[in-house]
Each structure stands twice: as structure tokens, then as C-alpha cells.
Image (cartoon, rainbow, N blue to C red):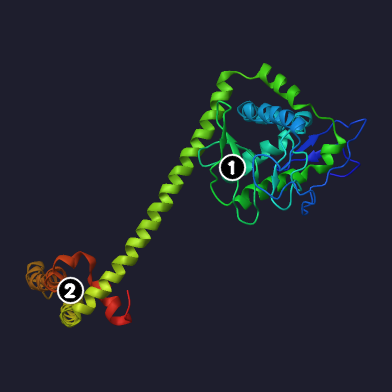
Amino acid sequence: MDNKTNFFELLDGSKLDGYLSANPLTPVSNAFAFDTTGQYLSIGRKPARTPKNNEAERQRGHKLFYKNVPLFLANADKILSDSRLFLAPVPVQNGLAYTGTSGFHRPTLGVYIEWWLYYKENSIDHNGRPIWYISGSPLSGCNVCASVDRKGNDHQAKLNGRFSSVWGTFTDVNARYDKAKSRFIAYSLEEVVALLKKETDDAQLFKTHLRLEYMKFRKEVDFLKARLRSAQEQTVKYQDRLRRMLFESKREEASAFYEKWQNLRTVAKLRYEYSLERRLELRKQLRAGEITNKEYQQTLRPIRKDRENADYAVRDYSRTGLSEVFGDDTGLFSVEVLDQIIKNGRL
């Protein structure tokens, strides 16, 4: 967006028309810088040394915002289609230790909506609650972020990942609209709440609740899947170690088994190749009329039987031979595993 356009671009690439203000606000900058006030050298729900006469107003602004988060999410489409709703200032001052409020200046309702919609892994906590307040240390990751449930109750947020991903994604979205915040008209948050309450029914709010519940359980399922994968990988690792130990304790017997198995497999391969050759020869004789079909079948039958017996001997010895060597631990081994150990010296 530049000074000649009357619109600004949203995260999804769509353009939102703005209503030019007759009295533009002082431009806001969200470039990061160290805090020079000394107010943000500690972590908490409020900056250090907040004036008492401002605290009650601050709390009212916070409550107005987080109590109506379900209402805002239920009307996300409306907020993203009307710049006056999108640019409504949110009276919540987020901040970080050491850098203070830089990056968090003048957040708007649309900034929160886009953050909640497009950065769900970072903006929705582990319990499926939207995060509305960001405070913590960018160095240690310690934080006291706050989230809100479907009934508008405030909770300390349990993050899904790193704190840096929470504040980093929020400040990225917030900084996108610095020019629009000063140039265009916006409703107050009180006006937004009054307007949306007139147009929102319980069904819309419940749909929002279901979407958040789905996200919560999806995250839980993803977490359990990750734990299962980790357990499976750990199991494979320990099984490999156990196989190596068992093989070393039975190296002589296992090597003798493997050598005999190879001999049986070689015999089976030769029997197979011989059966193919003889079948081709017999077919030629049958087509030439040198033998009858009965003679063909009588000659081929014992050859086929010898091949089947050789294949069975390989399969049977694979089972019984391994059992003789490893006993109750046979289930950890197969001929393929022994082949890898003996040929490559590893699993």
C-alpha cells in the first residue's frame, strides 16, 4: 500500500477498501528496538510501574476484548471484508522483556483475526483457546501469555511450541498494517461489539466453538501420533541392539545355520532352473509329436515335485533352524536380518 491508494492488501492477497480519515493519526512504526523506559525488564500481565489511575482503564479494555473473542471469531468473514472493522484498535498492549512494546504498537481486530486464522499452531494454545495477550522473554522463552475459552474466561496459555513463534508471527502480521492504521477510519472496539452482537446468533458462536474444539483434538491426536512414532523408533533401536548382542552370543551357531540355509537355497535354485529347462525340452518334444501328453505329464511331475520339496526345505529350515539357534528370541530374527549382519557386519 502507498499514499496514493485507498486500499490495503490482506494476508490472503485480497484488497480491502479503506475510508480515508480527515484527520490521519500519527504514523505508527513497529520496528524492533530495545526498551528505553525501563518498564519492560520484567515479565508479567502488565508492565512494571504501571500508573494506578491507568490500571482500571487498562483492565476494562482487556476485558472488553477477551470476553468477546468468540464473537469476533464467529464474524471473522465480516471483519475481513470491512476495513472499519478490520482496523478497529484493540486496547491490549503486548510486550517483551528488553524490547518492550516495539512490534506490538496499535494492534487491530483484523490483525488478531488473521493471526488466529493463518497461524493457528502459534495463536491457539494447547487447549484450543485463542491467545489474546502476549508477554514474555524473547531470550529465555519464559512467558505469561493469556488465552480465552468459549465462555470468555481468561486463562494462562499453554503454548504448543516456542514462544518466539508466538510473538514473531503476531508482530509480522501487526507490522503489515502500520500505514493503514493511520490513514483510514476505524470503528472503536465498543462499536464493533455492539454491531456484531446485533447480527450474531447462538448457532454462529457454537460453530466457532466446534472449530476450536476440532483444532484442540487434532493437536492432541498429532501429539499422540508423534509420541507413538518416537516410541516405535525407540523400540526399533533397542531391538537392533538386542539382536546384535544375541548374535554375538550365538555367532558360531548362527553362522553354521546361515551356511546350511544358503546351501539349501542354492539347491532349490538349481532345481528351479532344471525344472524350467526340462519343461521347455518336454514341450518341444510334445509339439513335435515325439511324446504324448501323458508322457509329458508323467516326466514333468517328479521334476516339479523335486522343486517343490527343495523350496519347502528352505522355508522349513528357515523356521526350525532359527528356533534351534535363538530359542525364545527367534521372533527378533529372520534370514534377511542374519544376511545383513553377516554380510555387512550391521543391521
Q: Which residue is drawn at 66% across and 19% down?
A: 197
Nearer to us in this view, 149 or 345? 149
Q: CA gap, disc 1 to disc 2?
A: 67 Å
Nearer to us in this view, 345 or 301? 345
Q: Residue 337's spot in the image, x, y percent? A: 27, 72
First of labels 1, 2 by sequence position:
1
Q: Residue 120 carries which label?
A: 1
Residue 244 visible here = yes
Q: What kind of element bears circle 1?
A: helix
- Mark 2 and mark 1 in contact (Cβ < 8 Å)? no
Identify the residue position indicated by label 2 in the image.
279
Q: Residue at x 67, y 29 (%)?
A: 65
Q: Residue 1's spot in the image, x, y percent? A: 84, 44
Residue 7 visible here = no
The quarter of the picture where the C terminus appears is: bottom left
Where is residue 231, by image quadrant? bottom left
Q: Is residue 269 left or right of residue 201?
A: left
Q: Residue at x 69, y 50 (%)?
A: 97
Q: Which residue lies furthest to the right in this view?
A: 22
Q: In this view, does 4 lie to the left or right of 168?
A: right
In this rendering, the label closer to the viewer, 1 or 2: 1
Give the residue type that dot 1 points to: Lys
